[in-house]
Amino acid sequence: MTVTTTKIPDPQSKDVFNAGKVLTLSICHFIHDIYSSFLAPLLPLLVEKFSMTLTQAGFLSTIMQIPALFNPFIGLLADRITVRYFIILAPATTAIPMSLLGLAPSYGVLSLLLFVTGVSVAVFHVPAPVMVSQVSGSKTGKGMSFYMAGGELARTIGPMVAVGSVSILGFQGYYPIMIFGILASLWLYFNFHGIDVQVKKSDRKPLLSTCREMKHILLPLTAILVTRGFMHASTTTFLPTLIKLETGNIWLAGFGLTAFEAFGVGGVLSSGILSDYFGRRQILIISLICAPMSLFLFVYTGGLLRCFMLLITGFTLLSTTPVMLAIVQENAKSSPSTANGLFMMVSFISRSAIVVIVGIIADHVGLPLTYCISAAIGLISIPFILMLPKNKAIL
């Protein structure tokens, strides 16, 4: 008599997708990014309060991105010491300054609050994807999709949370909502204090070695981030401003960004999973052909068709990040946090510089034409996608 047994996968195995831990990290990302998404929907009110130009308004986003300059060094630190407490504290240290924007008495204080937020955002986003990769096993794309879906869902709900809080409590009185970020940090402490993202000492590499090792990945990704960045800045930063200028309705402005981000969640959730099966490059090419075309049509159409094009733009444009994160982690086995820090630095710096350029262009030619220019630049990313290495599909 032969007895057959079924081998139960070890949940601690490096090849097993640990759904519980991935979902927990995704929730962590969601709570944190709710607060970091407040700037765009509140920007029209800040413009009105401080009588800012669109260039000054765009520079606020740049200030928030300045700490990204230190992302590679944060990554280097994360590969050598335990930085889980950075992740644990991030919801609170992001929630507090973003809940105080309405109380800022001057442009300088407003800039300081956004800079503090930028530091908190940086120390969270560099080690967190590495942690996701470690608990995703062989399904890195799937893990990144869940993780990034948490962030995109936060940016979907965040504008409505910001606008709703201001509508109920007033622009200067919405600060009590910071309590949810503080409570989230307490919750994270009890659930994440045992998680480590350190790399074995024998596998660690200095920053310059990681740069050389990742050059064939980071150079084309940088070009993609820059060319895509014009579309990203135009929509995620200035969409509420465009809608408010056209309609005069702050609620509609917040809802437009929410709808855009909501479809972005769908794109983020599906792109990484699909890239595990059909290849990273194939998904990036499809996304970065569809996004510029739908953005063109958003500008030149009206009514329901215009709304539909906005949703398609959100789905395709925002879907690229988990695929690029998966590419970075798959090609950075020795210093994953450092490599991710380099990628995040390039991402944030390009975005912060581009949003100022977009603001300057918009001041001179208007936002609709700026959207068209951004879409045209976005198509330039296609040749750089073909420079990325092919990954093996698992179909």
Image (cartoon, rainbow, N blue to C red):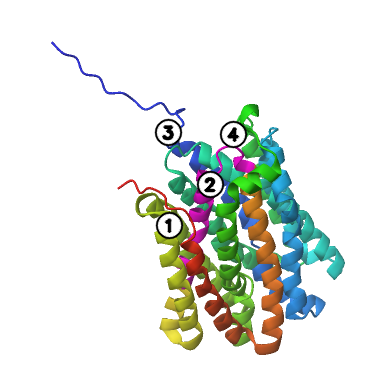
Residue receiving disc 2: 26
Question: Could you say which quadrant of the image residue 28 lies in?
Answer: top right
In the rendered structure, which disc, 4 or 1, sits on the residue that comes first in sequence? 4
Task: Give, as a three-letter code, the residue at label 3.
Answer: Asp
Magenta region, main secondary structure: helix
Q: Separation of disc 3 and disc 2 at Cα?
A: 19 Å
Which of 183 and 320 lies nearest the eye of the viewer?
320
Task: Give, as a three-letter code, the residue at label 1.
Answer: Ser
Mark 1 vs mark 2, foreground winner is: 1
Does 332 lie within the magenta span? Answer: yes
Task: Give, as a three-letter code, the residue at label 4.
Answer: Asn
Task: Give, as a three-letter code, the residue at label 2.
Answer: Ser
On the rendered structure, is 37 left or right of 67? left
Residue receiving disc 4: 191
In the rendered structure, which disc, 3 or 2, sits on the residue that comes first in sequence? 3
Task: State the extent of the magenta-drawn residues as a range.
Answer: 313-337
Residue receiving disc 3: 15
Q: Separation of disc 4 and disc 1 at Cα?
A: 28 Å
